[in-house]
Amino acid sequence: MNKPWQDFADEIARCHDAGRAVDFWWRDDDAGEPHAAFMRLSALAAQSRVPLGLAVIPQRAQPELFAALDDGTAVLQHGVDHRNRAPHGEKPSEFPANEAIEVALGRVAEGAERLAALAGARLLPVLVPPWNRFSQRLLGALPHRGIHGYSAFGPRASAEPMPGLRQMNTHVDIIAWKRGRTFVGAERALSEAAGHLAKRRTAAVDATEPTGWLTHHERHDAAAWGFLAELFEFSRRQAGVRWLHPRELFAQSDGR
C-alpha cells in the first residue's frame, strides 16, 4: 500500500477507534444524456454496490437515462438548465442574487415537475445547484415548493439551514477544474478525504455530516475511473466504513 492510501487507511482507523462514524456518500453531477460515459458510471455503481446520488439537469434529461439506473441510484435535481445567469464579472451561477425570486422558484418547480415525470419514485426532493452556488434568499422558500433537501460543496454550517430543508454537502471533488479539468490524482483526493474525516473526528466541522465524494462522469479519464473502482474496493476492506444511500441521508426532511 503506497503512502496516500496508507494515510487514508490510518485516518479511517483513528475515526473507527474513537467511535466516530466513517460514513461516505457519492454524488455525480451533470447527468442528462445516456452516452458512453454515463453508461460506464451506471455500470460502476451497480458493480460496486455503492449508492449513487445522480444529479440530473432537468432540461437535458432524456427518458433513456433513467432506464439504465439500478435500485442503488437516487435522482437529485441539478438546477434546471445549467445556464449561467450571473452578471458579467461574477462567478457562474444559475440562480444569481439579482434574479427575481418568483422567476427562479418557478424554474425550479418546472424542473422538478419534469424530473418527476421521467424519474418517478427514484427522484428525491433535493436541489443541487450548478456550480454549487445558490442565492441564500431562495433557501427559505424551497420547502414551500416541495424541495426538502439541498446539496452543495464544503462543510455545512447547519444540518437544517432552513426549517424543513436538510443539507448534505460533498467535500472531495476528483476533478481539477483549474488545472485542465482532469483527474486531480489519488494523492490529492485521498488527502482531502482524510482531512475531512480528521476534522469530523476532532469536531472542527460538523461530525455528523458524511464525507461526500463529488464526481462528474463526463470529465473522467482512465485514471479517474480506475481510482473510483479502487476506492470502492479499498473502502470495503476498512472496518466501520459505510456508503450511505441518498434516500437515507435526506430522509429526515422528506419523510421517506
Image: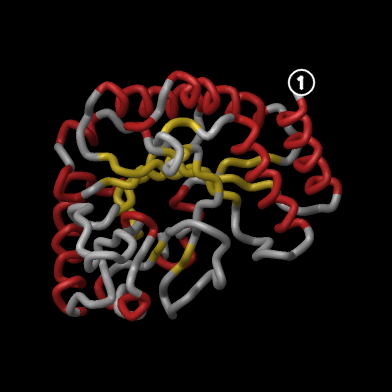
- Residue pushed farthest front? 89
* Quarter of the image where one finds residue 147: bottom left
Front-lying residue, 130 or 177: 177
Using residue 157 as the reference point, say whether residue 106 is left or right of it.
Answer: left
Asked whether the viewer can see residue 118, the reply is yes
Please say whether residue 116 is visible from this viewpoint.
no
- Residue depicted at 55% across the width and 72% down the height: 158
Provide residue 1's location: percent of width, then percent of height: 76, 20
Q: Quadrant of the C terminus?
A: bottom left
Instruction: Name the residue located 37 percent from the left edge and 67 percent from the top edge.
Output: 148
Q: Is residue 30 left or right of residue 228?
A: left
| Residue drawn at 29 percent across, 54 percent down | 77
| Element type where label 1 sits in the image | loop
> Is 138 located above or below residue 148 in the figure?
below
x and y, in percent, of residue 168 in the image:
49, 59
- Most distant residue in the right direction: 17
Q: Quadrant of residue 207?
A: bottom right
Colour scheme of the picture? secondary structure
Question: Is 48 displayed left or right of 129 in the figure?
Answer: right
Where does residue 172 sit, x and y in percent of width and height?
A: 55, 45
User: Which residue type does callout 1 highlight?
Assistant: Met
Q: Which residue is mark 1?
A: 1
